[in-house]
Amino acid sequence: MLKKSCLAAVALILSQTSVAKTAAQPTASSVINSASAQEWRIVDADNILKITLPTGSAYIELNPLLAPKHAENIKQLVRDGFYKGLSVYRFVEGFVAQGGDASGKKAIKNASKSLPAEFYLTTATALNITELDITDGYAPLTGFLKGFAVAQNEAQTQTWQVHCNGVFAMARDNNINSGGTEFYVTIGHGPRYLDRNITVFGRVIEGMEHFNRLSRTPIEGELFNPIADIHVLADIAKHDTSQFKVLKTDSNAFKSLIKARQNRSEEWFVETPDYVDVCGMPIPTKRLKS
């Protein structure tokens, strides 16, 4: 009886210790709210696309570090007015919304119709990222770089943006170098099997709801999900003063946020799995100006 009582007491102490540790663990929201000003970066308006859809505008941050040619080419297409009068012509529930020129016949002015694939960035030496200490079925390493969810080869000399919800990427046909004008946004659970098969070069930082609200079924005689306009945000600064900041993914605050999301200490949570995958880590983004 004495032995059982001792074991019960030890179990109670361990349980209380666990509860105390959980209580001491900051919540995700408290980490974000306590991040210093230096731990945030202002998103360059020249790297933001504003896409106006039937229900409102979405803002997309481009990723020129990992796909510089695609980022520059789409800005040129936008500035040439290529997307005016076009639409988001393909919608697959829980998967993708794809826009551009469904006919493939619209003339290109100063941009390129197709580009060499930029499935990943190759560097001569290892490129450091904020790593997640997890086993990932799609890549040796996963983590974050400059505000984007990424993966790498074991040597860290190949780095690519992964297919999480809300990524911005370039569609292609069987020719890997055929992408250039037809963009898509992922909707729902990220289709990670597309990683390194398509060039991913951005993410939606605001307005994801407008992609989710797109029509599912075309109506005869009407343009399916028309694109009212697309602008590079820097080009319309007089009319749209929107400004965004993103928590730096190499900051101490972001590293603390990873721990907070691995083991959720909010009162609502019963189970804390000590795990979060690369697509389960939303990158904090805040609007500063409207």
Image: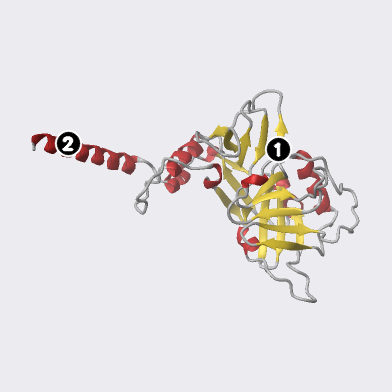
Vertical arrangement, residue 190 with respect to residue 123, above or below: below
| Rendered location of residue 126, percent (x, y) | 64, 25
Q: Is residue 133 above or below residue 99?
A: above
Of the residues tagged 1 and 2, which is closer to the observer? 2
State which quarter of the image contains the N terminus: top left
Label total for image:
2
* Three-letter amino acid code at the position of disc 1: Leu
Q: Is residue 237 visible?
A: no
Q: Give the residue furthest to the top.
A: 125
The C terminus appears in which quarter of the rendering?
bottom right
Earlier-in-chain disc, 1 versus 2: 2
Q: CA distance from mark 1 to mark 2?
A: 55 Å
Q: Helix or strand or loop: what does disc 1 sit on?
A: loop
| Residue on which the image places disc 2 | 7
Q: Residue at x 63, y 66 (%)?
A: 213
Q: Is residue 17 left or right of residue 136?
A: left
The local crowd at label 2, few if under 14, some if 14 to 19, many if 20 or more residues have their Cα within 10 Å, is: few
Task: Determine the secondary structure under disc 2.
Answer: helix
Residue at the spot x=83%, y=48% of the render? 76
Q: Residue furthest left?
A: 1
Determine which of the numbered discs, if any, sits on residue 66 in the image. Answer: 1
51 or 237, which is in the foreground?
51
Residue 122 position in % (x across, y down): 72, 30
Residue 96 is situated, as x and y percent measured from the top left of the image, at: 67, 57
- Type of amino acid at the residue the image marks with label 2: Leu
